[in-house]
Amino acid sequence: MRGGRRTSFARRDSNLALLGALVSGVILAFALLLLVIQRVNPEQGSRMRGATLDALSPLISVARAPADAIRGIGGFFSDHWRVVQANRRLEAELAAASVRADKADVLALELKRLELLIGLRRPERRLVASGVASSASATAGLRSATISVGATDGVRPRMPVIASDGLAGRVTDTGRGAARIMLLTDANSRVPVKVVRNGWAGLAVGTGGTLLDFAYDIVSGTDALRVGDRLVTSGDGGLFPPGIPVAVIVRIDQNPPRARPLANPAGLGPIMVEAPWLPAPALVPATAAPSEPDLAVAPVAAAGSPAAGSPAAVLPTPGLAGAAVPVAAQAQRP
């Protein structure tokens, strides 16, 4: 029985091998036939090749169906896993944002309560004129531009100039119908700013080039400046209103870090000129202190005696209304 089984298995394997060889031979012969026909009659070869593709297309689709199904199932589970991970990440971000929003609401209410308590009055921004910036110039570290509004429009030196993308600079000189402004990149420009993300304060210092230096003091050892941090005006000094976009940090691998102005100095376009956020304090002349003649003592020529030929100076005697005692007599008292 065992020998018969082995014989049947061997016969089946040989039959399968013979069938595979026969199919391979037929395929090779058919391919060779197509090649010969293509050489002899290209038009007929193209038609036979198209008919062959049409005949084999269903078979190819059936053969690929299991692989496509497995690949589709794998893609489904992979997409599902990615969606689950993204959903978890978004839920965590939403929870953190909700906590921050709650803290911001609490701080806003507390700030409002304190403002009502002390009667705080915030300065308001006041627009002076609006125009267009043109003809930017750069010479030896100086960066300036000309704007189309001047003294007749109410523009005065030291007024901040704001472009559509952020702070542009401040007015330095005025004419009747035009004015010159110092750009942020000017080597003499200094703007008090703060980092929006963590509130670090510092100065945006012009370098005379295309970037700004951010001079600041490190406040926390657990935090660090990052590329992409935005700088806005802090309001310190009273010239620039707080909260105006100024620059974005682009390099932190050097000291001080470098920032790129948000308002392009080479193409400011429309601009607004505002009054200084805090007006300059008015100087009140100090009044002289009232003199006290009852404490004045007349000068004497020598200690303890009046000058020769001059009347003795007198001082009022405390406790005696209208009485006066010579200075020499007071000096002789024990």
Image: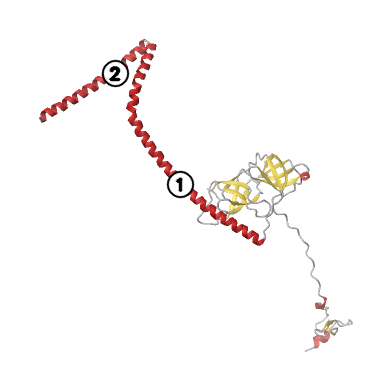
Q: Residue furthest bottom?
A: 334
Disc number lying in front (1 or 2):
1
Q: Position of residue 89 (x, y in %)?
A: 45, 46
Residue type for callout 2: Leu
**Relative to residue 196, is residue 164 depicted above or below?**
above
Q: Position of residue 228 (x, y in %)?
A: 55, 46
Q: Is residue 235 left or right of residue 63?
A: right
Q: Is residue 35 left or right of residue 283?
A: left
Residue for point 61% across, 58% down: 111
**Relative to residue 200, is residue 52 depicted above or below?**
above
Q: Position of residue 60 (x, y in %)?
A: 34, 24
* Quarter of the image where the C terminus is located: bottom right
Q: Nearer the viewer, residue 179 or 48?
A: 48
> Would you call the spot at circle 2 few (<14 residues within 10 Å), some (14-19), or many (20 or more)?
few
Q: Position of residue 61 (x, y in %)?
A: 35, 25
Q: Is residue 44 left or right of residue 2?
A: right
Callout 1: SS? helix
Q: Residue furthest right?
A: 309
Identify the mark at residue 89; answer none if there is no mark.
1
**Relative to residue 176, is residue 309 depicted above or below?**
below
Residue for point 13% across, 29% down: 5
Identify the mark at residue 28; answer none if there is no mark.
2
